[in-house]
Image (cartoon, rainbow, N blue to C red):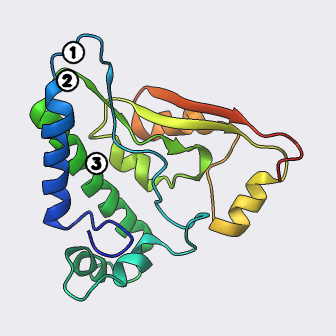
Amino acid sequence: MTGTIPDYFDPEFETRCAEIAAKDVAPRAEDPLLVGYFLDNELRWGPDHRSEKTLLQDYLELDEGAPGRVVAESFDGDASAFLSALSERYFEVTTTAIRSVDKNHLVLGIRSVSVVTPPEVPAAAAAWLDVFSVNYYLYVPGTVEILEAAFGPVMSTADWLADYHEATGLPLLISEFSFRALDSG
């Protein structure tokens, strides 16, 4: 890891995932009451409330010679292609670490944030996950426009669950549900 964002291309990320799997996953490999594992929760895949930068911009600011920066430099300003490569790396490393010590349980995904997870992420996840998990939020009128103004395009709210299924071909797990009060801001 380098700085405040994880360098998924750094071999240390792979090592750390293997260590976590050995410590936390392997002891549960034969647990008949366990359904599976979430990889993470609401990761940042681009501009959002945590940062206005794309991950390509973030990775280009990593230390000179950092593995992620070297990869980012090869994408010549194509943030979408970089996000696809980054997502693929993330899902490959995390899922491989789990499956190396537990072939009996499902890999449930990352608990994506409703309509704001970029399409490159579910596309990359499809080859690695057993289930695509998503946190389901209802949006009051005007919320999507506010999200898009702040962070760029989001998925259509019309059939977004169907869109995730189409992008991944996987079953979906709604891993969190909420609705906002009209006065929540």
Q: Which mark is residue 91?
A: 3
Which residue corresponds to the image point at 28% horizontal and 48% vertical from the top-left?
Answer: 91
- Disc 2 versus disc 1: distance between alpha carbons? 5 Å
Residue that lies at the very extreme toward the right in this rendered image: 183
Image spot of residue 73 (x, y percent) = 29, 83
Tag 2 residue: 28
Q: Is residue 1 above or below residue 169?
A: below
Residue that lies at the very extreme toward the top in this rendered image: 32
Say whether marks 2 and 1 touch (CB < 8 Å). yes
For badge 2, the amino acid type reads: Arg
| SS for dot 3 | helix
- Disc 3 versus disc 2: distance between alpha carbons? 21 Å
Image spot of residue 149 (x, y percent) = 73, 68
Image spot of residue 105 (x, y percent) = 24, 22
Image spot of residue 78 (x, y percent) = 41, 76
Which residue corresponds to the image point at 41% horizontal and 42% vertical from the top-left?
Answer: 110
Tag 1 residue: 31
Between 168 and 110, the one lying in front of the other is 110
